[in-house]
Amino acid sequence: MHKKGQSISINTIIIAAIALAVLVVMFAIFTGRLGGFTKGVQDTDTCLQKCTSLNMASGSNPTSEASKACTDGQYVAGVYSDGKFGCCCVPK
């Protein structure tokens, strides 16, 4: 009498691999280890970079929450390393 051994189906192996990958990502998110990937992006975000991407020059940035307007250019909202209350981009 020949006995056939039971094996794990390929679908079960694929589902287990996906579940393991999801658990690793969730672990990274909840332990705060995923923050290292975005640290470099936050450090290089500047008004000069934003204005250059709009094909404009960087003007005088707003100095307070109340003065979020540019009379001679375009206001770009956000908090940047060289503009705490946004950027003012002027035409070149």
Image: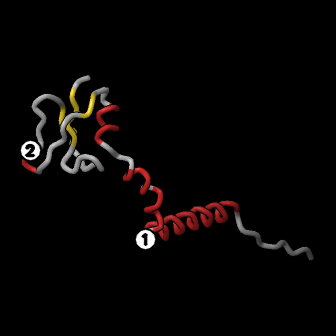
For disc 1, the marked residue is 30
Task: Classify 3 as above or below 41.
Answer: below
Image position, residue 86 (x, y; %): 21, 45
Is label 1 in a helix, a strand or a loop? Answer: helix
Task: Check whether the beta carbons of the residues at disc 2 and disc 1 lie within 8 A of each other.
Answer: no
Picture residue at 38% right of the left edge, 52% below the top = 43
Query: What's the amino acid at mark 1?
Result: Phe
- Please identify the residue farthest to the left as the structure is shown: 66
Residue 13 position by quadrant: bottom right
Residue 17's image quarter? Answer: bottom right
Query: Which residue has dot 2 on it?
Result: 67
Question: Which disc is residue 49 wearing?
Answer: none
Reply above or below: 50 against 42.
above
Q: Residue at x 23, y 24 (%)?
A: 91
**Mark 2 or 1, nearer chain start:** 1
Residue 55: x %, y % from top left: 31, 26
Task: Identify the element where label 2 is drawn.
Answer: helix
What distance separates the C-alpha of mark 2 from that of mark 1?
38 Å
